Image (cartoon, helix red, strand yellow):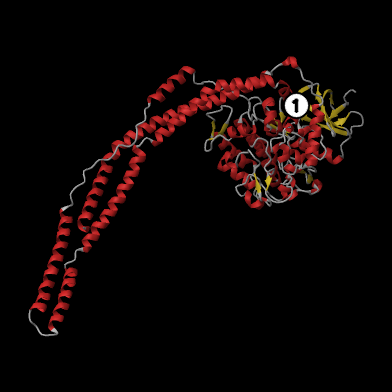
Amino acid sequence: MPPPEVVDASGREIRLDTLIGQGGEGAVYGIRSSEDLVAKVYHRPLTPERAAKIEFMSSLSNGILNQVSAWPSGLLLAKSGRAPVGLLLPRVKNAKDIHKLYSPKSRLTEFTRADWRFLVRACTNTARAFGAVHATGSIIGDINEGSVLVAPDATVKLIDCDSFQITGQGKRYFCEVGVETFTPPELQGKNLRQIVRTVNHDGFGLAVMLFLLLFMGRHPFAGRFLGRGDMPIPKAISELRFAYSAMRADVQMDRPPNTPALSIVGDEVAFLFERAFAKQMINGGRPEPQDWVQALTGLEKNLIQCRANPSHWHHKAVSCPWCPMEAATRTELFPFVSLGGEVTALDLTALWRQIEGLQSPGPAPNIQATRPAPSAEAVSVANSFRRANVLAFAMALVIGGIGVFGGLSAPAPLLFLIAALVTFFGGRRWLDKSSDVYKFRDAEANARNTWLRAQQEWTERAGSGAFDSKKQEVLRLKALVDHLPTLRKSKLDQLRTSVRQAQLSRYLDQFEIDKASIEGIGNGRKRTLQSYGIETAADLLSTAVENVPGFGPKLCGALYAWRQSVEAGFRFNAATGVDKRDIDKIEHEIGVERRKLEQAVRNGYEELRQLHARVLNARTQLHAPVEIAYAEYLQADENYKAVSR
């Protein structure tokens, strides 16, 4: 069928070229006279209101809008009858749906150079595009994964702009549709046809889009509900159950397994997500595009490359979140990056020699000291105490002797005996030096505690415990490095014995759940599956779907039935053999593991050198003060023993 005949608003004929694509609403054609424009022709003539909206939108067109969106540039009329039937749009070249970028599986094939830096930059550009639309007084409204296209340089284009809410010339043209997984809580379940959208409403959808990009396609409201019953995404949104929030326990939610924490984006971006999804922001206060641009620009400046896997970039304040995520899910998150700069076998041999040459410093040397004699003061106190006893006894003996042998009549002898006892004990008390004894006792206790602390520090810092433990750890790393060739051979052998399974998995990976029509599996449930890493028919080979909240036997059965219907079209080709991509993947995995281990060995060697130097330095610096502490303890101990005999 030939393309329809159309003219622009001035009556100039626009000759349409080949059909580019079509949907339920209309078809998109190339234009013979321009490589920069396309024509969108609706299946039915436009209403006068829709035509007026497009005409007004074209009057708002400017350079910035055209950079970030496919903004209508004019109205198209049927050549015969001049009924409004479509619009002219900028041609979007070499750009793909944003969900192909944030989905890890499609990213590997559709965006082969996209690491996390690229995703952060795409986020920044998405926020800029939203800001450009808002600057015209317009609202995007229908935010969804098909409304944003991303180019290979991370620039973005907003499409389907004719659905935006436009205000001007005393009239408001509503955005009548929306996707529930991007719709803010205050609009969930409402008829959107006559609702006035706001920048704050867009702020929610923008935050969801940015979260999907930064968190590997995981939806911020798809998590594990810790209460009773199911918690589909629209319900979680309406109840503000942000699964990654620092306060998620308060709303009985937790992140799905093997997903990174909100902290991976840094404090500033994390705070914006908390604001965007907070109850307090429903009436206003969600982050606006310029807030995101500023925070995301700062995030990109703070990214560093993972030392174990050069495909990974992460915030410098946290350890790489992608390494453990890939290990747990056995899914590559980013396209392969050549490792380069690996340590050669010769380098490793030399490194092992250096490690083995670092001998253990051995246990901390014993602290030697000769036990001293009591101090003169201690001897004086001890002697004075003995003299006091002798003197008191002598005085009591004299008085008692007078009473007994002095020939005195009763009751004088008894009184003298009593006086003798009083004299003995009173004299001892008067001549008592026990306060000096207490002083020596306290001095001994203090000196003993000081010595014990010094001894513990000496043992820990001047001993070889930490060095010996680290060396054993490095030797275990060496064993793992030595085992890598065996591990590589085992994995390659396993590939050769599982060629059919590998072909089947790759075949099933072509069928995305998002594009499939599966009974009971709507857009919300598809987003939930994606948040649990289930994107294609290949992901349904395992029973992982049965652990996804809200997926009981009926829904799981529907998914398995769909997978089986897809699998029925698979044909095994024995002649193909092992797919080179599978071999490359194993070589990459082994290379990453080798790099990680080699880096750990290098770090271990540096730590060993530092520990060895630290021990020797501690022995030099601590020996004298520890020796003094020991000598002071021995002196205090001898003093106390002398006065307490």
Quarter holding the N terminus?
A: top right
Percent position of residue 271, x then y: 59, 45
Quarter of image, res 586? top right
Quarter of image, res 551? top right
Circle 1: residue type: Gln
Quarter holding the C terminus?
A: bottom left
Residue in front for this viewpoint, 92 or 66: 92
Percent position of residue 170, x then y: 78, 46
Residue that protrudes farthest toward the top in the picture: 575
Using a 10 Å C-alpha cutoff, classify the residue at mark 1 as few (fewer than 14 neighbours), some (14 to 19) or many (20 or more). Answer: some
- Answer above or below: position of 612 versus 585: below
Viewer can see residue 31 = yes
Residue that protrudes farthest toward the left in the picture: 406
Residue that protrudes farthest toward the bottom in the picture: 410
Residue in front for this viewpoint, 307 or 37: 307
The residue located at (54%, 30%) in the rendering is: 306
Report the side of 165 relative to 304 (left or right): right
The residue located at (34%, 35%) in the rendering is: 363
- Answer above or below: position of 443 versus 343: below
The residue located at (54%, 28%) in the rendering is: 308
Residue in front for this viewpoint, 585 or 641: 641
Viewer can see residue 164 = no
Percent position of residue 71, x then y: 74, 33
Report the side of 539 relative to 364 (left or right): right
Percent position of residue 321, x then y: 58, 35
The residue located at (63%, 20%) in the rendering is: 492
Quarter of image, res 315? top right
The residue that mark 1 highlights is: 510
- Answer above or below: position of 420 versus 58: below
**Element class at badge 1:** loop
